[in-house]
Amino acid sequence: MPPPMSFTSETWSGGLVAGVPADLRCVVVRRGVVLVGTEHEVLMLRAGEQHLARRALPGGVAPICALSVEPRRGPRLAIGAPRAIAVLDGDAVGTRRIDPSASPLEDLAWGPRPGGGWALYEMSEEGALDRTHPETGVIEEIPINLPIALASGDDGLLAVASMDPESPAVWTTRDGAAWSCRLLPELDGMTGVHGFAVAGDAAAISIEEGVFVSRGLDAPFTRCAALDHGTSLAFEGDSPAAPLLGVVHPEFAENIVRVEADGTAARVVMIETPVGMPEPFVSALVWDASRSVLWASIEGVGLLRSAPRRARGGQLS
């Protein structure tokens, strides 16, 4: 049983979504499609629907380590496991096994490919980045050294965080051919990223050294003091000026803090457990623009839905 907890907010409403298992591994949202992955199954909420539906995984595609929704109408869904990737296109399912001699998959994301259309960007545990054309199976190596995190935007932007000691940076592309680079020296030597999000040309990343935000391609990364020691991140919208939502960790609680582009910050949600119980930990945040809802994966507990009180979307039973 998940630990008892309370949800407190003066400005937002919300609560745990019924029927979602506690063993959540990832959650993504795009174009009204909410995709939730547990170890052995996927739950899906399509645009206009009110109930999460379960979908069994293709054989061998488990445990889930990554999910991605294609940024187009009638999107394809990508499900990643360490040794296999499945692409769901309506009722059609295509599965590709990863060579046993290759490094396991760590993350994946839909992104643009040169000439138009979409491809899957696949990051391995050893720090290699490939781009796969789902229709043909052609695989290209992307020459970004030591990638450690991927993020993608609703408008098709793809971002890659690299800890290359020669140029630790966040790389972004809108066409799969031309890449822009924003240096972030603090990425050098990092072994992992706690949170990574994009909105338009804005990017935010959470690492051991802190949370850093850039609001444009030519804007340097600056530290976001309000989210120091924070983890999961999500922009509240797809504009470069969208507020940034992040999770910070006071004792026995998780606070979701909203930071405006000018740096003004306010706590919007507090999640608490009683003293002596396991402390809550929000492992992922995603903003659902179609419903004006924030979805949060709480480790060992389930899925939290919260929204500003002016918004009424995303009600589930």
Image (cartoon, helix red, strand yellow):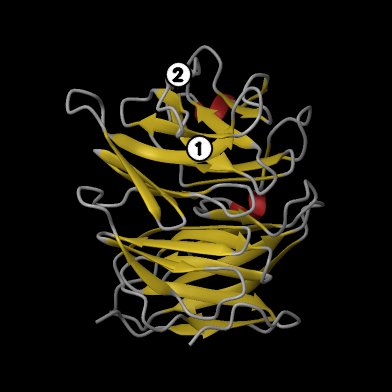
Residue 211 in sight in this render:
no
The mark found on residue 140 in the picture is: 2
- Whichever of labels 1 and 2 marks the residue nearer the N terminus, that label is 2
Q: Nearer the viewer, residue 281 or 115?
A: 115
Which quadrant would residue 190 be assigned to in this image? top left
Q: Is residue 40 visible?
A: yes
Where does residue 248 sit, x and y in percent of width and height? 53, 60
In the image, 258: left or right of 20? right
Location of the N terminus by quadrant is bottom left
Question: How many badges with numbers are in the image?
Answer: 2
Q: Amino acid at mark 2?
A: Glu
Task: Say which mark, if any, is on residue 150.
Answer: 1
Frontmost residue, 39 versus 226: 39
Residue 135 in picture, x, y percent from top left: 46, 33
Alpha carbon of mark 1 to alpha carbon of mark 2: how far?
A: 17 Å
Rendered view: 242 above or below 181: below
Amino acid at circle 1 = Leu
| Residue sitting at x 26%, y 32% | 98
Disc 1 is placed on an element classified as strand
Q: Position of residue 299 (x, y in %)?
A: 35, 65
Q: Residue furthest front?
A: 92
Residue at image coords 60%, 69%: 47
Up-down relation of residue 317 to residue 110 (above or below)? below
Near-viewer residue (123 or 114): 114
Helix, strand or loop at disc 2? strand
Q: Residue at x 49, y 76 (%)?
A: 271
Label placed on residue 205: none
Residue 21, picture quadrant? bottom left
The 10 Å Cα crowd at callout 1, few under 14, some 14 to 19, many 20 or more, is many
